[in-house]
Amino acid sequence: MPPPTSPAHVVTVALGDRSYDVHVGAGVRARLNSMMPPGARRAAVITQAGVGWTVDSGLDQSVFTVADGEEAKSLAEVERLCRAMSRAGFTRSDVIVAVGGGVVTDLAGFVAAVYHRGIRYISVATTLLAQVDAAIGGKTGVNLPEGKNLVGAFWQPHAVLCDTEMLTTLPPRELRSGQGELAKYHFLGGDDLDALDLDERIAAAVRIKADVVAADEREGGRRAILNYGHTLAHAIETAGRYDLRHGEAVAVGLVYAAEVALRLGRIDSERVAAHRRVVSGYGLPDRLPAVLDDDELLALFGRDKKAVDGVTFVLDSDRGVEPVVGVPEKILREALAAIR
Ligand code: GLY
């Protein structure tokens, strides 16, 4: 039996008639059955065995368990799920409930986007990373052998439940990885995050993300700021020779972005120190693993999905964080030296 729901934070992602609420707090998963979309008769619960939490949608529900880990984010798994849902008779008026972290959210959201040309889905986000990032904003998709998230769709959920009680069973390293994404929000307007407890902090991060998504749902411009710290992070992950979780790589990437901004005269050294303080405050790394060399990282920066015209970095300034096109290679190299 889920615990009684404590007072929760409710943040609206304002997208006109596709607006939805994100509920943050201990026990909010108990709200699931009151959130079912009108007309839904059945729920397809998509989850991974390692998630370790079950939910009660209050509808006739079938559970589809996908492979553990990132392997689940494949077109083969999309086909398998769509075929299983089809055999089980799911229709366009039914609902998918994604229960898990970023992998499940991305995969189940994409299945929702394409099954019968689009059905409604609700995310029950069980990891910190999903609660402050992946589950919010409607980016869904899967990987190809050629790269991560290369096939996807913008498809907004019907509601999101960020049950902070679910974080109590997360392995410590998984929690730390989510803190890397949380650290990012300190520089996206969340200057007061330090003063907040975890539930409030998650809700504040969700509020920042909700505002950005509402302003630029399809990443025509401003939404790119949510990738603060991610250019180096993606390069580290793609190089793949060092065991850093996504949020840990983002933490190093935040400090790197600050060092780049410093060398472009956009911020001062006190602001760089603030980046290091926030990252270390979460117990996250602020240095680059020695096994990754500069030439390889620079080559990977150019291959980042966000590299539209030369190397684009999201960088801090007095005006806030913004995308900057064409950062000179010399600056990129100097800043790499500063995080060795
Ligand atoms: N994770 C970045 C975004 O949702 O835009």
Image: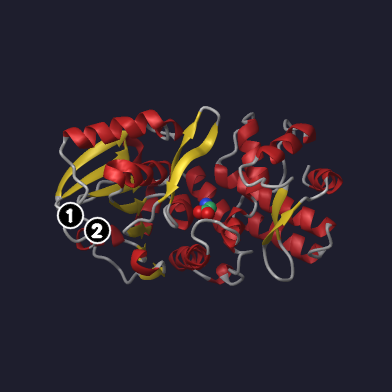
Which percent across, then down, holds residue 98?
A: 32, 47
Residue kind at label 1, given as amino acid type: Ala
Observer-nearest of 256 and 309: 309
Observer-nearest of 284 and 14: 14
In the picture as drawn, the residue positioned furthest to the front comes out as 117
* Residue 27 shows in the view: no
Q: Is residue 288 left or right of residue 134?
A: right
Residue highlighted by disc 1 = 40
Occupied quadrant, residue 189:
bottom right
User: What residue is drawn where x is 43% and y is 46%?
Assistant: 153
Occupied quadrant, residue 152:
top left
Label annotation for residue 152: none
* Residue 205 shows in the view: yes
Residue kind at label 2, given as amino acid type: Leu
- The quarter of the picture where the N terminus appears is bottom left
Which percent across, then down, holds residue 181?
A: 55, 54
Classify mark 2: helix, strand or loop. helix
- The quarter of the picture where the C terminus appears is top right
User: What residue is drawn where x is 74% and y is 56%?
Assistant: 258
User: What residue is drawn where x is 75% and y is 34%?
Assistant: 290
**Residue 21 against residue 103 in the figure, above or below:** below
Classify mark 1: helix, strand or loop. loop
Badge 1 local density, few (<14 within 10 Å), some, or many (20+)? some
**Residue 8 against residue 183 in the figure, above or below:** below
Label annotation for residue 32: 2
Which percent across, then down, holds residue 322?
A: 67, 61
Q: Is mark 2 within 8 Å of ligand 1?
A: no
